[in-house]
């Protein structure tokens, strides 16, 4: 059973700037991967081409960009940033509302960062949940052995909230060093950075 959870991130100014730049780069890598998929390139061909185009992007982000690109249909036109939003932007002539639409479209087009998890990488190599002074944070890899930390803003809404399940699984994995894979995707929306975590509620059924 796969579960999806949403949370919000809090960062200081310099780290936020680094994260937004990383999101912009991987978003561009996702678009490039999609174009290569449409021309029937293999995974290895796409990977090599993306490594050349984005030499400073950590390699696992390249693999995750290809993974994300494969979620889009290749048999029809895809408008990154949203087709409906792009059409509204093109038709709008009011300067104030046009700027607002443009900002929203750019957020959707350039504001994505995803890292596919793996059990061997302590759950996720590049975007990993960690506890710092009893508070939950995300450790985000921005370069070769370069990290930033973002505080996770999320409280369980009630006792049945699946966030409780996820936290319990995290603590158990940290204490027993028996990790489970989880995928994290970040999205920029209205100037705020939100995270989405995807994991299997019963990981032993598939990854045991």
Image (cartoon, rainbow, N blue to C red):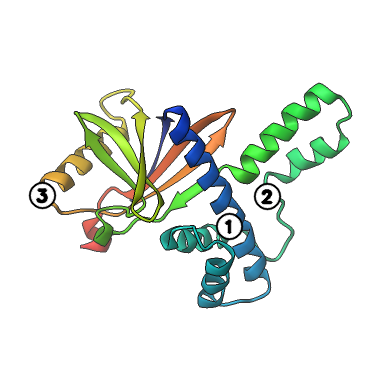
Secondary structure beneath label 3 = helix
Name the outermost residue toward the left.
176
- Distance, label 2 to label 1, CA atoms, is 10 Å
**How many neighbours does mark 2 have within 10 angstroms: few (below 14), some (14-19), or many (20 or more)?**
some
Relative to 190, is 178 above or below? below
**Residue occupying the point 74% across, 34% down:** 102
Numbered tag placed on residue 30 in the rendering: 1
**Label 2's element?**
loop
Q: Which residue is mark 3?
A: 176
> Residue 63, percent across and down?
46, 64
Callout 2 touching callout 1 (CB < 8 Å): yes
Residue 161 percent coordinates (x, y): 31, 30
- Quadrant holding the C terminus: bottom left
Label number found at residue 80:
2
Residue 93 image label: none
Q: Nearer the viewer, mark 1 or mark 3?
A: 1
| Whether residue 135 is situated above or below residue 29 in the rendered picture | above
Q: Is residue 79 left or right of residue 56?
A: right
Report if the CB atoms under discs 3 and 2 are less than 8 Å apart. Answer: no
Separation of residues labelled 3 and 2 (CA atoms):
42 Å
Q: Is residue 6 left or right of residue 47?
A: left
Q: Secondary structure at mark 1?
A: helix
Front residue of 92/134: it is: 134
Quarter of the image for residue 90 reads top right
Crowding at dot 1, Cα within 10 Å, few <14 / some 14-19 / many 20+, comes out as many
Q: Say whether residue 90 is visible.
A: yes
Q: Residue 65: x percent and y percent?
A: 52, 59
Q: Is residue 2 visible?
A: no
């Amino acid at each position: 059973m796969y579960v999806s959870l949403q949370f919000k991130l809090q960062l200081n100014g310099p780290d936020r700037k680094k994260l937004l730049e990383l999101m912009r780069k991987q978003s561009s890598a996702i678009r490039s991967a999609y174009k290569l998929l449409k021309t029937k390139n293999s995974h290895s061909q796409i990977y090599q081409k993306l490594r050349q185009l984005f030499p400073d992007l950590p390699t696992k982000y390249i693999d995750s960009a290809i993974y994300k690109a494969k979620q889009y249909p290749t048999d029809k036109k895809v408008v990154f940033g949203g087709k409906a939003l792009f059409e509204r932007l093109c038709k709008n002539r009011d300067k104030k509302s046009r700027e607002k639409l443009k900002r929203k479209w750019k957020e959707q087009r350039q504001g994505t960062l995803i890292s596919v998890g793996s059990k061997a990488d302590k759950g996720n190599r590049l975007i990993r949940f960690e506890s710092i002074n009893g508070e939950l944070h995300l450790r985000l890899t921005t370069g070769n052995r370069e990290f930033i930390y973002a505080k996770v803003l999320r409280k369980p809404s009630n006792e049945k909230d699946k966030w409780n399940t996820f936290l319990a699984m995290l603590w158990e994995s940290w204490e027993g060093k028996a990790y489970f894979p989880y995928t994290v995707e970040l999205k920029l929306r209205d100037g705020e950075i939100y995270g989405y975590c995807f994991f299997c509620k019963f990981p032993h059924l598939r990854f045991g």
